[in-house]
Amino acid sequence: MFEPYRPEPYSDFRNPGPLAAYRGALEQVRGQLGGDHPLVIGGERVFTDRFITSIDPCNLDRVVGRSAAGGPAELERAMDAAEAAFEIWSQWTMEARAQTLVRLAATLRRHKFELAAWETFEAAKNYAEAEGDVAEAIDFCEYYARDALRWSAPAPTYAYPGEENSTSRIPMGVGVIIPPWNFPLAILVGSAVGPAVVGNTVVIKPSPSTPVIAAKFMECVEEAGVPPGVFNLLTGEDADLGDALVDHPRTRFINFTGSVATGLHINERAARAQPGQTFLKRVYTEMGGKDALIVDETVDLDEAAAVATTSGYGFQGQKCSAMSRLIVTAQVHDGLLERLKARVEELRMGPAEENFDITAVINRRQCDKIVGYLQEGSREARLVTGGGRAEGNGYYIRPTIFADVDPTASIASEEIFGPVVSVLKARDFDHALEIANGTPFGLTGGVMSRDRERLERARREFRVGNLYLNRKITGSLVGVQPFGGLDMSGSNSKAGGPEYLRLFMEAKTVTERF
């Protein structure tokens, strides 16, 4: 039905053409900053008397925009709209819904640099990080559109004399999508279009830190001709909307990405049946990690330092997949630490709109949290470089390395979500693997080694949902590396993989005796 799936290509911003195009998009978006953005409920733009103000993390005097803040009345209205749309959308053929996703992907592609520019201002993403986020959103639409087609066929069953038996999958109903601020388009889109393509409708509550990019997505939804009510945008404060959406008796499923504390809270609340609720809610969570890269004595240390720098400091370490622990065997520990320090100190820091390597972290709360860990780390370990805030009218944190770190130290065991890497010395590869697995998290990990036996052992024993051998541990591609963690990193839903859409469907068996 469609041409074969392939991931959206990335631009090379070292070339004058893409660089000029991106800067042009920044200027276009700069002229739109400071505007007001509505809720979108049943295809209608809705304003309230309250707003969330979005500030550029790199320039605290710049207002990116104001987004209408919904409350209980808007929540009920969104549920009504999603439920009404479900009655129609669920009856569409899978092929028709898949075609709608492909049109949405084409719309996002036409606005790729514009959407990325909004992320540069709102989420402090430099050019490559912002474009990568939009490309991943496009990939989710394209991949799930194609994968959905196979789910329209009946499941295989054995024949039985005198009967016709069939098992099919049917959509569930209305779901709630709660995406994070660090991938404000990619995770929002992937979490929403997957359930939608198989017939569900959703209410999207984006992070209060990045509401404007969610509003821009809804503009693309309208442009692509998606029927009203399939996607409903409900911006607002977490305290006003979070629990209410999870508890709502018409919420069939919750798709969440965020902190462990919030994920556990959602899981607990969703397990309680509410008055009027007639089903068990499903909860899918992705809750972060304390990701480790193991480097042994068999590899090129310059290559290892480059991989560690990319893995640990891309987007200021604000990725659930980011390397926050570098575990090095004793023979090469000092040499790799020296090379890593040199590379990190070469990273340029400044505003995202000027495409610096390191920009600001997302908000004051996150900045204060990271500074607290930096202070704790200075007591727990040896500060190698960085270690505090940098000058500038934004939430700038110097990229930081700690060495002589005990595996049980807070900086080595708790998720910091910032440009902070703990370097841990291991006696040998056995000890390195023991340290890597000594955490309740299990999202991403990596091993750099030229020893085949060690790599095969890591395949078996390194307990993570995504394991990368001899490459960076960030940057999973939709359809290529299905993504999702084990243990306290989440419910292993494997976004962008062949098992994901089944999570949002029920199975129904029909038997007729002749």
Image (cartoon, grey):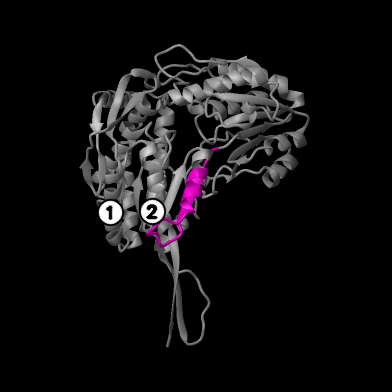
x and y percentages locating residue 514 in the rendered image: 42, 88
Q: Quadrant of residue 322?
A: top right
Residue 232 shown left or right of residue 185 in the figure:
left
Q: In which quadrant is the N terminus drawn? A: bottom left
Specify few, some or many for label 1: CA neighbours under 10 Å numbering under 14, 14-19, or 20 or more: some
Give 454 or 190, whichever is nearer the viewer: 190
**1 and 2 marks in contact (CB < 8 Å):** no
Residue 375 shown left or right of residue 146 in the figure:
right
x and y percentages locating residue 350 in the rendered image: 43, 16
Residue 404 shown left or right of residue 98 in the figure:
right
Q: Quadrant of residue 151?
A: bottom left
**What are the residue bounds of the magenta stretch?**
264-288
Decide if residue 340 is in sight here: no
- The numbered dot on residue 251 is 2
User: Which element carries disc 2, helix, strand or loop?
Assistant: loop
Residue type of the residue flagged with mark 2: Thr
Precedes in sequence: disc 1 or disc 2: 1
At a point 40% along the width and 18% down the height, the residue shown is: 351
Disc 1 designates what residue? 80
Q: Is residue 261 above or below residue 494?
A: above
Q: Quadrant of residue 205?
A: top left
x and y percentages locating residue 98 in the rendered image: 35, 55
Q: Is residue 90 above or below residue 133?
A: below
